[in-house]
Amino acid sequence: MASGGSDEPAKDGRRSEPRVRGESIALLVLAGIALGGGLGYLVDWLAGTLPLFLIIGIFAGFALALYAIYLETR
């Protein structure tokens, strides 16, 4: 068995940590951008300020996604 993401001990006797997969990173970034953009669009639609909060929401969602990736890889 490969020791990449399994819970088997490595050759030196220590357990290897599970690695974060690229798919989960991509999903976090896409979900953060989509959720931030969607909430920003909703606020813009209610306030009539299109595209102000849409742009803010996209950047905020991206920043939160980067923070979530940091927490996952820490």
Image (spheres, rainbow, N blue to C red):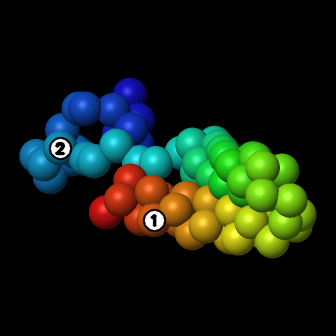
Residue 26 appears in the rendering: no
Q: Which callout, 1 or 2, points at the residue further toward the start of the chain?
A: 2
In space, the residues marked 1 and 2 are separated at their CA atoms by: 26 Å
In the depicted structure, whether residue 1 falls above or below residue 63: above
Left or right of 5? Residue 39 is right
Instruction: Residue at 40%, 43% (x, y): give it.
Output: 4
Amino acid of disc 1: Tyr
Left or right of 20? Residue 53 is right
Residue 40 horizontal/vertical position (percent):
72, 56
**Residue 10: which quarter of the image?**
top left
Are the residues tagged 1 and 2 within 8 Å (C-beta)?
no
Residue labelled with disc 2: 15
Residue 12 horizontal/vertical position (percent):
14, 52
Amino acid of disc 2: Arg
The outermost residue toward the top is 1
Q: Helix, strand, or loop for circle 1?
A: helix
- Give residue 24's mark: none
**Residue 9: which quarter of the image?**
top left
Instruction: Residue at 62%, 60% (x, y): give it.
Output: 61
**Residue 1: which quarter of the image?**
top left
Residue labelled with disc 1: 67
